[in-house]
């Protein structure tokens, strides 16, 4: 038997207060829940629940096991949430070059650097930005930004 499944079923039985309630929440049959709990008790070689036709209660070992199961399953859920957030969050290094007309971009770089796992490497090129022209296209047809030098002043 899968230990985690047994732990989940047992926790649900305790939290629901009945095998029927646990079966409804888990989307399985009541006999399946009962079999899982009995298999768990057999594997652990200890009775976890006192049950009769009217009432169910935890034994002392059952209370101890329930607290540990709850903690383990919560830790597992937290670890899975953390991994999910790592998978969905952008990461890496974003390199940004700024020219003298892109001063507002400095605030953007600062905000990005403070917002999460994205490293921001910025560089000030000190040259004006040129508007893209037809010769700015790469062989794939995408625009390539380019920096141009300001015109030299006329000789005096």
Image (cartoon, rainbow, N blue to C red):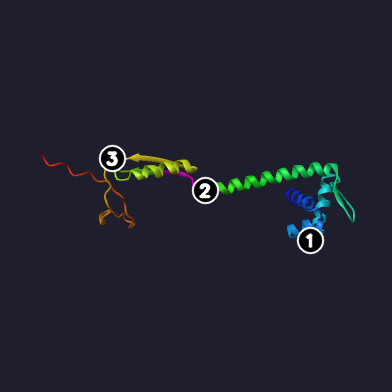
Q: Crowding near pointer 1: few (<14 within 10 Å), some, many (20+)?
A: few
Kind of element beneath mark 2? loop
Task: Specify whether residue 61 is painted magenta.
Answer: no
- Pointer 3 or 2: first along the chain: 2
Q: Are marks 3 and 1 in contact (CB under 8 Å)?
A: no
- Name which of mark 3 and mark 1 comes first in the sequence: 1
Residue at the spot of label 1: 29
Residue 89 within the magenta-colored segment of the rendering: yes
Q: Give how far apart the Cα atoms at labels 2 and 1 are.
A: 39 Å
Task: Please tell me the numbered disc located at residue 89.
Answer: 2
Q: Earlier in the sequence, mark 2 or mark 1?
A: 1
Q: In percent of the image, x 52 and y 48: which residue is there?
A: 89
Q: Position of residue 108 (x, y in %)?
A: 40, 45
- Residue sitting at x 39%, y 43%: 107
Residue 94, located in which quarter of the rendered image? Answer: top left
**Which label lies toward us, 3 or 1?**
3
In the image, which residues are magenta?
A: 87-94
Viewer-proximal residue among 119 and 41: 119
**Mark 3–mark 1 distance (CA, rounded to whole Å):** 71 Å
Q: Residues within 10 Å of mark 2 (few under 14, many from 20)?
A: few
Rendered location of residue 152, percent (x, y): 17, 42
Q: Residue furthest left?
A: 156
Q: Which mark is residue 126?
A: 3
Distance from label 3 to label 2 (Cα)? 33 Å
Is residue 83 rendered to the left or right of residue 37?
A: left
């Amino acid at each position: 038997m899968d230990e985690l499944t047994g732990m989940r079923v047992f926790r649900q039985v305790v939290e629901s207060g009945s095998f029927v309630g646990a079966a409804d929440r888990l989307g399985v049959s009541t006999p399946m829940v009962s079999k899982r709990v009995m298999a768990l008790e057999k594997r652990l070689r200890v009775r976890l629940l006192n049950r009769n036709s009217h009432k169910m209660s935890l034994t002392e070992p059952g209370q101890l096991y329930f607290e540990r199961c709850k903690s383990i399953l919560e830790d597992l859920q937290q670890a899975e949430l953390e991994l999910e957030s790592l998978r969905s969050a952008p990461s890496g290094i974003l390199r940004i070059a700024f020219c003298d007309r892109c001063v507002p971009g400095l605030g953007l770089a600062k905000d990005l650097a403070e917002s999460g796992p994205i490293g921001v490497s910025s560089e000030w090129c000190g040259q004006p930005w040129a508007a893209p022209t037809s010769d700015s296209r790469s062989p794939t047809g995408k625009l390539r930004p380019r920096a141009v030098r300001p015109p030299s002043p006329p000789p005096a």
